Image (spheres, rainbow, N blue to C red):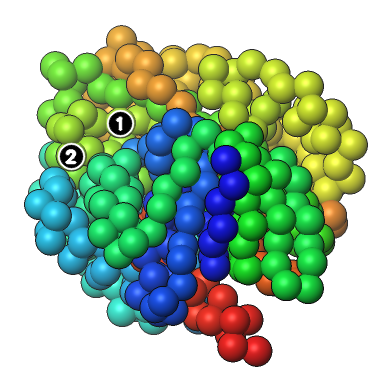
Amino acid sequence: MTVDADVVVVGAGIVGMATARAVLDELPGLDVVVLDKESGPAQHQTGRNSGVVHSGCYYRPGSEKAELVREGRAALVDLVREHGLPLAESGKVVVATRTSELGPLAEIERRARAGGVETHRLSGTGLRAVEPHARGIAALHVPSAAAVDYAAVTRALVEEVLARGGVLVPRAEVLRVAVAPAGLGLATTAGAVRTRWLVNCAGLQSDRVARRCGAEPGVRIVPFRGDYLSLRPAAAELCRTMIYPVPDPRWPFLGVHLTRGVDGLVHAGPNAVLALGREAYAGGLDVQDTVELARDPGLRRLAARYWTTGAAELLRSRSVALVARELRRMVPEVRAHDLVPAGSGIRAQALRPDGTLVDDFEFAESPRAVHVVNAPSPAATAALAIGRTVARRLGALVHR
């Protein structure tokens, strides 16, 4: 099979499908083909998360995350309602249980205010009025937090892309890319593809796709596995909305939390453990990925600085009792027997050679291509805005 296209989008997760739709809208008249190596869309990060629609309260004012989450959240809610998909508008609380967390909680409140996100400061008594089983010395109530089914949202985007004349080709992993002045030649597992322009939304494989296109993104994707548990039905009343700890500002993770999804289940987690494979959801080992990790100087520098934190996360990942103990800081009634396994996901986190994790969304360009270099959570919430941003970048290349 040989496919010719004006634009190829690599990756059929929510960011890839949102980008394909945006390209069709922003650059009418171009043929758009989406390639994905799996049998269908949303098989990786998009389909393996807790479904939270983030409010944007955590992010540095003026950052890509702050701007795109605000824009993307509004567009996401509109899309969900237009397609009649479930939306649980429950809100959330961020709970401080130690005096050392009051300063970081105040910083979250400041960032939320600067970003136009509604929050309400709660005392311990006020917290119990929102979440009767939660305990803390102070909290922030964020009414705009919600939950959706991101895989269902992605399927709705597939429908819209196809209705606009786009094409989705499954089982088409990009193996090699030949760059020429007039376009790109892709060797894929589904056959040859020729395209004038390429957009890389490959998530866990995005750095590899970028390098195959001749780009040097300046980062390597490091996979962090997050294991989820859920509360048994008899214990689900312990969480009405979403209950989060005050996050450690050193990390782009939000800590172990409780979130009620659109399915009514209360999810607990995730932790954040280095995965020995970009798609090792069951905790196995991929030899190529593991060798790359072992050779990565950035990861060695990161591990040297934070090995104790990593060891604690690894230990907790192996013990439901330790997860329950962490949750009891916020919800004292949670017990280990209340928690049951509920799958896992892997976060594509970009890491720089100096050992710093890339905190913001990040994009790059190469001849005839735009690359989404770093788009971990809250990328699903921001996906429609990310798609528009990428489409504009592509438009600038096309018209250059």
Q: Is residue 348 visible?
A: no
Q: From the viewer's perspective, is 398 left or right of 339?
A: right
Tell me what residue is drawn at x 60 percent, y 24 percent.
280
Give how far across and how far down residue 170 sits, in percent. Answer: 47, 38
Q: Nearer the viewer, residue 9 or 308?
A: 9
Give how far across and how far down residue 244 sits, in percent. Answer: 35, 45
Disc 1 target residue: 267
Report the number of discs: 2
Q: From the viewer's perspective, is 285 left or right of 288?
A: left
Q: Is residue 17 visible?
A: yes
Q: Quadrant of the C terminus?
A: bottom right
Q: CA distance from mark 2 to mark 1?
A: 11 Å
Mark 2: which amino acid? Val
Q: Is residue 393 above or below residue 272?
A: below
> What mark, if any, has residue 262 been given in the picture?
2
Q: Secondary structure at mark 2?
A: loop
Q: Secondary structure at mark 1?
A: strand
